[in-house]
Image (cartoon, rainbow, N blue to C red):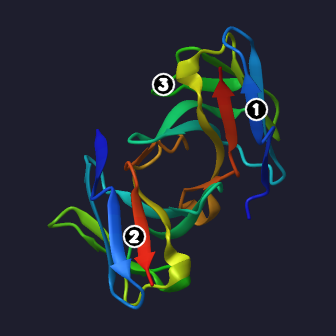
Amino acid sequence: AQSVTQLGSHVSVSEGALVLLRCNYSSSVPPYLFWYVQYPNQGLQLLLKYTTGATLVKGINGFEAEFKKSETSFHLTKPSAHMSDAAEYFCAVSGSASGGYQKVTFGIGTKLQVIP
Amino acid sequence: DAGITQSPRHKVTETGTPVTLRCHQTENHRYMYWYRQDPGHGLRLIHYSYGVKDTDKGEVSDGYSVSRSKTEDFLLTLESATSSQTSVYFCAISDLTAGEETQYFGPGTRLLVL
């Protein structure tokens, strides 16, 4: 079984401040972890992913996330928020595929508000 | 860009009518998925397909059926729409490049059932 918990359904930061969106997961197998971003009225766009290897993962738009196995966490950060970062962010976990089928479990999402 | 389109993008229908949503991909991906997105629930899997005419149920499949007669098209049908099926529906594909499976999403279809 696998699950994702995103702490905080709404997060507000000032422009230029640190962005920290929290994600904890559970998985019975080594996980693949993802962050997606969704802008209003659009689909989900892959921000970054962790599969194997380096635990600090860099993504698009200056975001990064660190896989911490001991804490079962995959928090998303960005040093300096920009107005264009306002969106909803989804953390997701996937176990190894069975015959190629990738079961992905999504968190409920965190809406990021950036205050001028 | 994974070459995924969805149609229609918006639809309003009445309770009890059948509705079919279409997902089209241009890159010959084997795996395709239908999700629904609702506030407080994130994305939940409705059905998925692992090849032409090969489909299986997800976690919220009741009231939905799917078909895949061609690699590029994956159809989602609401046999008799209900107000609880008002949602945003997303199609996704799995990209298995280099063995790292990643799902990519279409733009979504907003469905309102009155």
Seen from this angle, which residue lies furthest front?
A116
Please give the name of the residue rendered at 67% of the width and 39% of the height, measured from the top-left corner.
Answer: B110
Q: Chain of mark 2?
A: A
What's the residue type where badge 3 is placed?
A: Val
User: Of the residues tagged 1 and 3, which is closer to the observer?
Assistant: 1
Residue A45 horizontal/vertical position (percent): 59, 63
- Residue holding disc 1: B11
Residue nearest the viewer, comparing A40 with A26: A40
- Residue holding disc 2: A52
B35 on left or right of B76: left
Instruction: Give how far apart the Cα atoms at labels 1 and 3 are.
Output: 21 Å
From where the camera sits, is residue B75 visible?
A: no
From where the camera sits, is residue A6 visible?
A: yes
Please give the name of the residue rendered at 66% of the width and 48% of the height, measured from the top-left corner.
Answer: B93
A76 on left or right of B51: left
Residue A107 horizontal/vertical position (percent): 37, 50
Q: Is residue A7 above or below residue A96?
A: below
Q: Tag 1: Cα neighbours inside 10 Å, few (<14), some, or many (≥20)?
A: some
User: Of the residues tagged 2 and 3, which is closer to the observer?
Assistant: 3
Which quadrant of the rendered structure holds the N terminus of chain B?
bottom right
Please give the name of the residue rendered at 68% of the width and 26% of the height, measured from the top-left corner.
Answer: B54
What's the residue type where badge 1 is placed?
A: Lys
Picture quadrant where residue B57 is located? top right
A59 on left or right of A65: right
Q: Is residue A49 above or below residue B110?
A: below
